């Protein structure tokens, strides 16, 4: 084999660079989805935690005559950035800039989305127990004409007790009390206390259900990712986050929280709306409260947003 033949073999074809006149056209987004990668987060105490993540990486294709983009470059940029440094707004800005620099003749917009589970150890309500809770997190960033936008999302499970069901249960308990303690019968404090502790007295209970708060926020410039702060703010507003390890005293405390925080889905959405509206780090937000009904085979849902012009709003998909 001559040197010329050897060089010809080494010059591998690049089909993506060849024009396709018959199918020319610009494309909104081209890229890769479900890339497996690690994500590293710096915690408040300075420690670093790493979690497995799934990444979506895209650029637009602005040249109608170009057949495709360089997908391997997107993958290599994702691998290099996420493997070598903690996830921050600055690191995501650099990642998107590398997307665009490596596609300078092809693209002028880029976006990335990173989905992972963030684990937090939570104490029990009363006992000395604690356990791990998992929060699904999504971080999305985009760059267009030098403008960088950043969104943080999380899903939070909580309990909701129906106010209407609670009122109906109280009415039935009143009726049973009236039947068991007639007007001509003298009341005994001990007898009433005993009656309150029996199933025959408390004849009805309100229905409760596990519920999901979906939270999406657009972060104002100059702030790091407030992942745990965002979770805590929402859970503090709702007051009934689901628990992990529980003993009887924890379960009783949880029942008390539910009784003191009766909520329709509309109440839950407004609680979150009020809590997020007061956070200066959040430029805009969208929340969805889904109560996975135990009474019905369908869910009760309420959606709220900050209402920033050009941001989330009534047209956002519920």
Image (cartoon, rainbow, N blue to C red):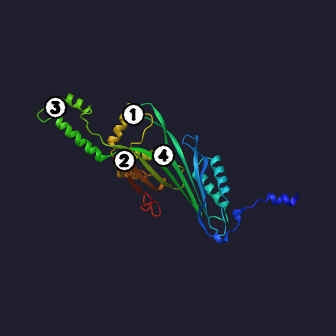
Q: Marks 4 and 2: which is nearer the front?
A: 2
Q: CA distance from mark 1 to mark 4?
A: 24 Å
* Mark 3 vs 1, N-terminal side: 3
Ranked by sequence position, the earlier of labels 2 and 1 is 1
Does the residue at mark 4 contact the one at mark 2 (Cβ under 8 Å)? no
Q: Which residue is mark 1?
A: 250
The residue at the far top in this view is 190
User: Which residue is situated farthest in the left direction here?
Assistant: 184
What is the CA distance from the residue labelled 3 to the residue labelled 2? Answer: 39 Å
Q: Residues within 10 Å of mark 1 (few under 14, many from 20)?
A: some
Residue 4 in the image: above or below residue 187 = below
Alpha carbon of mark 3 to alpha carbon of mark 1: how far? 33 Å
Residue 85 or 201: which is nearer the viewer? Answer: 201
Q: Mark 4 or mark 1, which is nearer the start of the sequence?
A: 4
Ranked by sequence position, the earlier of labels 3 and 2 is 3
Identify the secondary structure beneath mark 2: loop
Whole-percent x, y for residue 170 in the image: 25, 41
Q: Quickly name the residue at label 4.
A: 229
Question: Circle 3 is placed at which residue position?
Answer: 187
Badge 3 element: loop
Q: Residues within 10 Å of mark 4 (few under 14, many from 20)?
A: few
Placement of the N terminus among the 4 image quadrants: bottom right
- Dot 3 or dot 4: first in sequence order is 3
Inter-mark Cα distance, 2 to 1: 24 Å
């Amino acid at each position: 084999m001559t040197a010329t033949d050897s060089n010809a073999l080494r010059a591998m074809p690049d089909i993506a660079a060849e024009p396709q006149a018959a199918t020319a056209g610009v494309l909104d987004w081209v890229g890769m989805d479900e890339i497996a990668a690690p994500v590293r987060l710096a915690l408040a105490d300075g420690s670093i935690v790493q979690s497995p993540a799934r990444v979506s990486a895209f650029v637009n294709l602005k040249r109608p005559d170009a057949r495709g983009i360089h997908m391997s470059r997107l993958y290599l940029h994702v691998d290099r950035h996420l493997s070598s440094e903690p996830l921050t707004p600055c690191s995501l800005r650099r990642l998107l800039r590398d997307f665009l620099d490596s596609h300078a003749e092809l693209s002028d917009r880029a976006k990335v989305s990173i989905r992972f589970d963030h684990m937090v150890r939570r104490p029990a309500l009363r006992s000395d127990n604690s356990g791990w809770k998992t929060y699904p997190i999504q971080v999305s960033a985009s760059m267009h004409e030098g403008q960088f936008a950043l969104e943080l999302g999380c899903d939070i499970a909580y309990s909701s007790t129906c106010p209407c069901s609670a009122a109906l249960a109280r009415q039935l308990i009143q009726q049973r009390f009236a039947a068991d303690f007639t007007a001509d019968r003298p009341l005994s404090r001990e007898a009433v206390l005993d009656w309150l502790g029996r199933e025959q007295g408390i004849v009805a209970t309100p229905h409760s259900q596990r519920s999901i708060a979906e939270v999406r926020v657009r972060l104002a410039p100059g702030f790091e990712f407030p992942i745990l702060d965002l979770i805590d703010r929402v859970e503090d507003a709702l007051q009934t986050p689901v628990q992990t390890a529980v003993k009887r005293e924890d379960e009783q405390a949880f029942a008390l929280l539910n009784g003191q925080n009766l909520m329709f889905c509309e109440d839950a959405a407004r609680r979150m709306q009020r809590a997020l509206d007061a956070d200066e780090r959040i430029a805009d937000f969208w929340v969805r409260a889904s109560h996975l009904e135990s009474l019905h085979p369908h869910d009760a849902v309420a959606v709220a947003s900050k209402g920033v012009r050009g941001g989330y709003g009534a047209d956002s998909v519920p």
